[in-house]
Image: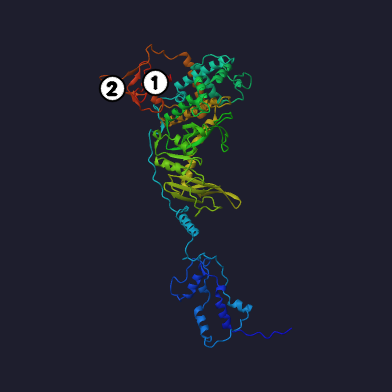
């Protein structure tokens, strides 16, 4: 083996020149092509005094070193000096031997800091680099979030101007409040004489139909006396509860009830209850023939009492400024198509009613029975159409404050109601269309109790507030925060302490005014007369009796407030009111049998005019008063009934009144 000679010493300048000639292999290109790098390299000038020479960056992380920033000495100058020291072409020299590779020490001292090689065609991330499509979208998103961000509690929020409250009638009872109103007279505002007569006639017709079908039971024609005794027993069953109907007539201990056995036999009561019918049986058959067609009415069997009850609720009371809308469940497990299931309600199976109630006293002002998707208007969704159906703006007026839960609340609904001068407030679901989805300055995941964020979009105010969990609100009549506080029990250092935490204005008003329907449900549930039955329409009959009794009791309380220093003798509690009502029903039944109404004159019904050549007399239409329009006057009256009634080309109350008698 031949021994290698000693290593030759390579001058430092030759190593530098070799590395500089191979610069394209050491330094990554900065531009999108090698040609641009070459042009940029050849045109490099000393521009240290220019502001545009070195791209600026907001942070050190975004900055990447370029070729010009690696070497402290300008490369063209160094290369030019090396070429001047080389011999000219007139004195050819042999090519020098390739220098040995630099040692590790030289490589470590001469190699520039490593840089990340970018893909070809991708621009630099400097502040002045051209933005790509993705970069533009991110920038636009960031700008929109910055302009549409959530605001803190300390930031000022504009308070909307309060709506001018202009109801069509004075809030409260709309009938004559100067006279004395007994419990039964208030109840008869909802169970009017015409409705009672219809129920009696239809019950007699249904009993005759059942007898014709071969059913064997004792039946006497139902009269007004029997019906009011039957009603008094129904109200009594809400006060005294037993397991079976027959227990009310047992004379052995512990049931020994004097009433109802002394007023009506058990067989008579059961015969009325079995034959009770609200609609005309013949018309029921015609409606059943339309089953599975668009003309079929699922609620036909309750329509006579249902429509009159809704009309009476709206006619005899004007709501105060705050109203609320919610669902009500009437308990039932009958196998009918209108039965619903709601897992979040205490009563999960039953019939669903949408109810508009006065928030201050719980008066049921308007409601409708939900008959299923095929029967409802779903152009804007059920939650939107339900609210619009419950708000007859011509009867209400403007300036009302409506409170809803998250099922109804939507930016579209609140915006449309704001155009009709109805203020709205309610909880809202975060995935509803129109709810802000920006995360800029949002509530942190572990926010403390009392933390809140808000954002305003036109008339809509969206609020997030942290209580035991996050609560989201939407309102068109509140400002975000006015400095109000709310007491809460917080656990600190292992002990529960009472603390005051900030609370948005919308949440305070929502807690005060949302419970109108719940208050009505509580009053109904206290002494409900509803019982198990095989017929679904009888369940509604019991519920309508409950609604009439509760609304009558609330009107009784309102009258007492208006006449505290007048002839009002006593304010009844709810239980006492029901007891007095059952007693007066029994007395009314006995009185109607002893002193029958005076016989009608032998003259026939015929429209006559109050007007004469000397005077023009116009009086309030009787039927319009009963249907909720108390200020309609007419000059026509019935000669036999002596009742003023509208009779013209647009309205024929004369015919409608006599058809209902």
- The location of residue 350, given as percent across then percent down, is 56, 31
Q: How is the protein colored in the picture? A: rainbow
Q: Disc 2 on helix, strand or loop?
A: loop
In the picture, the disc for residue 368 is none
Rendered view: 440 above or below 52: above
Real-space Cα distance between discs 1 and 2?
23 Å
Q: Is residue 260 visible?
A: no
Q: Quadrant of the N terminus?
A: bottom right
- Report the residue that reaches farthest toward the bottom: 91
Rendered view: 137 above or below 586: below
Task: Tell me the residue that label 1 is attached to.
Answer: 655
Q: Earlier in the sequence, mark 1 or mark 2?
A: 2
Residue 26 lies in quadrant: bottom right
Q: Quadrant of the C terminus?
A: top left
- The location of residue 280, given as percent across then percent down, is 49, 20
Q: Is residue 7 visible?
A: yes
- Report the residue that reaches farthest toward the top: 602
- The location of residue 659, given as percent across then percent down, is 42, 19
Task: Tell me the residue that label 2 is attached to.
Answer: 616
610 left or right, relative to 569: left
- Report the residue that reaches farthest toward the right: 1
At label 1, counting other C-alpha atoms closer than 10 Å, the crowd grade (few under 14, some 14-19, many 20 or more) is few
Closer-to-camera residue (174/288): 288
Closer-to-camera residue (187/214): 214
- The location of residue 652, given as percent across then percent down, is 37, 23
């Amino acid at each position: 083996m031949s021994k290698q000679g000693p290593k030759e010493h390579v001058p430092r300048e030759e190593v530098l020149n070799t590395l500089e000639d191979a610069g394209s292999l050491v330094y990554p290109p900065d531009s999108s092509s090698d040609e641009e790098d070459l042009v940029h390299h050849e045109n490099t000038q000393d521009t240290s005094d220019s502001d545009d020479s070195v791209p600026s960056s907001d942070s050190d992380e975004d900055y990447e070193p370029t070729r010009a920033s690696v070497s402290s000495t300008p490369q063209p100058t160094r290369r030019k000096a090396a070429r001047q020291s080389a011999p000219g072409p007139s004195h050819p020299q042999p090519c020098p031997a390739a220098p040995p590779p630099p040692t590790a020490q030289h490589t470590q001292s001469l190699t520039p800091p490593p840089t990340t090689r970018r893909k070809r065609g991708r621009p630099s991330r400097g502040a002045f680099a051209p933005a790509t499509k993705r970069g533009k979208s991110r920038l636009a998103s960031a700008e929109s979030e910055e302009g549409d961000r959530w605001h803190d509690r300390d930031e000022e929020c504009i308070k909307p101007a309060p709506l001018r409250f202009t109801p069509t009638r004075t809030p409260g009872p709309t009938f004559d409040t100067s006279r004395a109103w007994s419990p039964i007279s208030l109840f008869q505002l909802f169970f009017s004489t015409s409705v009672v007569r219809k129920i009696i006639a239809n019950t007699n017709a249904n009993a005759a139909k059942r007898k014709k079908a071969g059913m064997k039971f004792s039946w006497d024609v139902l009269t007004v006396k029997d019906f009011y005794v039957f009603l008094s027993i129904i109200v009594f069953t809400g006060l005294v509860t037993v397991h079976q109907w027959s227990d009310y007539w047992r004379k052995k201990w512990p049931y020994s009830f004097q009433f109802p056995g002394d007023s009506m036999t058990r067989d008579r009561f059961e015969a009325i209850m079995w034959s009770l019918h609200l609609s005309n049986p013949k018309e029921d058959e015609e409606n059943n023939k339309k089953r599975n067609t668009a003309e079929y009415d699922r609620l036909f069997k309750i329509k006579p009492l249902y429509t009159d009850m809704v009309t009476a609720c709206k006619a005899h009371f004007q709501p105060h400024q705050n109203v609320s809308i919610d669902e009500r469940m009437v308990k039932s497990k009958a196998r009918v198509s209108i039965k619903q299931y709601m897992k979040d309600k205490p009563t999960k199976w039953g019939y669903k009613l949408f109810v508009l109630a006065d928030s201050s006293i719980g008066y049921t002002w308007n409601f409708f029975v939900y008959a299923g998707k095929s029967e409802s208007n779903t152009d804007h969704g059920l939650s939107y159409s339900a609210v619009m159906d419950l708000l007859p703006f011509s009867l209400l007026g403007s300036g009302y404050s409506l409170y809803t839960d998250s099922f109804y609340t939507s930016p579209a609904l609140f915006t449309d109601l704001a155009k009709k001068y109805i203020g709205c407030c309610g909880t809202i679901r975060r995935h509803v269309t129109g709810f802000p989805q920006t995360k800029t300055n949002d509530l942190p995941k572990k926010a403390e109790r009392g933390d809140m964020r808000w954002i305003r979009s036109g008339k809509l105010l969206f609020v997030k507030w942290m209580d035991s969990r996050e609560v989201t609100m939407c309102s068109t009549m509140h400002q975000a925060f006015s400095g109000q506080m709310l007491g809460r029990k917080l656990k600190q250092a292992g002990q529960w302490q009472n603390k005051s935490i900030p609370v948005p204005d919308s949440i305070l008003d929502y807690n005060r005014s949302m419970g109108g329907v719940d208050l009505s449900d509580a009053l109904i549930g206290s002494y409900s007369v509803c019982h198990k039955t095989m017929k679904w329409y009888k369940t509604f009959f019991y519920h309508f009796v409950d609604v009439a009794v509760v609304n009558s009791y609330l009107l009784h309380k309102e009258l007492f407030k208006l006449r505290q220093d007048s002839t009002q003798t006593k304010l009844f509690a709810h239980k006492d009111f029901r007891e007095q009502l059952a007693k007066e029903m029994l007395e009314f039944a006995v009185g109607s049998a002893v002193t029958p109404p005076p016989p009608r004159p032998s003259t026939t019904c015929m429209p006559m005019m109050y007007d004469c050549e000397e005077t023009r007399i116009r009086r309030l239409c009787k039927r319009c008063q009963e249907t909720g329009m108390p200020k309609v006057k007419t000059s026509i009256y019935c000669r036999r009934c002596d009742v003023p009634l509208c009779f013209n080309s647009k309205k024929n109350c004369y015919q409608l009144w006599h058809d209902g008698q």
